[in-house]
Amino acid sequence: MQTVLLLIAVSACSRPAENSAAAPPPLANEEPTQTQLSSPLQTDTEVPSPTITQTATPTPAPTFTEEPSPQPTATLSPTPTVTPTYAILRAEVLQRANCRYGPGAPYLYKYGLVVGSNLEVIGCNDRGTWILVRAIGGDNPCWVNASLMEVQGDVMAVEPVYIDLPQSPYYAPPTGVSAARSGSQVTIFWNPISMRPGDETASPPYLVEAWLCQDGEVVFTPIGSYETTVVIEDEPGCSEPSHGRVFGVEKHGGYTRWVEIPWPEHE
């Protein structure tokens, strides 16, 4: 039995196999046969697409132009204003005197001064010929001629002042005020003020306050008039212009509002 099986095996090994010969290689420029094309195709393995990594481009930092530092502005120190210091003096009344509303005889009488009285001198006119006095510590000053007083100290050391006149509620100011010049003479005109009976005053019923050029400087000059015209001297040669104004005067101790004089220039 073993012998039979061995013989079958040998016989099978010795039979030529069909189509066992290898296929010849294809000739040059020869199209591949169907057998060649039917060989198993290589399975494509999906290659992942490359991931594009975006590299962030750094944004350039903003360039700042350095502004110039402001230069400190020099601050000018204000020039200190020098305030003059004026004296308050004492004076004794040498003889009975009339104390008035303004620095001059044309002004109305205010009250009388008794000989030997001691007063304070708190002001003067521009030439020191009239002084403003009051009782020591008082508050009712008036003007007196400096020649009637014995002043302790230099009159010109006190303050040059002007005090407004009390205004009358009863009368309007003068009208028709005008002026004309002839050389150094200035003539001033105005219309009369009609006073009620009993309101007339023994003092001049009209007052002119003028700032006149005399000897190269402007001098305050009060002028009383019983008429509606006055003639005054106004010289050339001052750096400041001359000017003036007119008041009416009534006995109750009041003055009308003043009216500016249209001052004529030098020819």
Image (cartoon, rainbow, N blue to C red):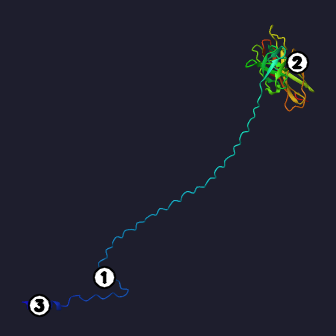
**Dot 3 surroundings within 10 Å: few (below 14), some, or many (20 or more)?**
few
Q: Quadrant of residue 49?
A: bottom left
Q: Which residue is mark 1?
A: 36
- What residue lies at 77% left-to-right and 19% top-to-bottom? 134
Quarter of the image where the C terminus is located: top right
Identify which residue is drawn at 86% across, 28% down.
218
Using the image as rendered, state which of residue 231 and residue 153 is in the foreground: 153
Q: Position of residue 78 (x, y in %)?
A: 72, 39
Residue drawn 31% across the image and 82% down it = 36
Residue 201, numbered circle? none
Find the distance from the CA under tag 1 to the CA under tag 3: 39 Å
Residue 174 in sight from this viewpoint: no
Query: Circle 2 is placed at which residue position?
Result: 229
Label 1 – label 2 distance at C-alpha: 152 Å
Q: Give x and y (percent) for residue 80.
A: 73, 37
Secondary element at image label 2: strand
The reply, left or right, for residue 20 in relation to residue 163 is left
Query: Mark 1 or mark 3, which has the lower sequence index?
Result: 3
In the image, what residue type sits under mark 2? Thr
Which residue corresponds to mark 3? 6
The amino acid on which the numbered mark 1 sits, given as a three-letter code, is: Gln
Density class for disc 2 (Cα within 10 Å; few <14, some 14-19, many ≥20) is some
Indicate the amino acid at tag 3: Leu
Where 216 falls versus 136 (above or below)?
below
Q: Nearer the viewer, mark 1 or mark 3?
A: 3
**Which residue is more in the foreground, 191 or 226?**
226
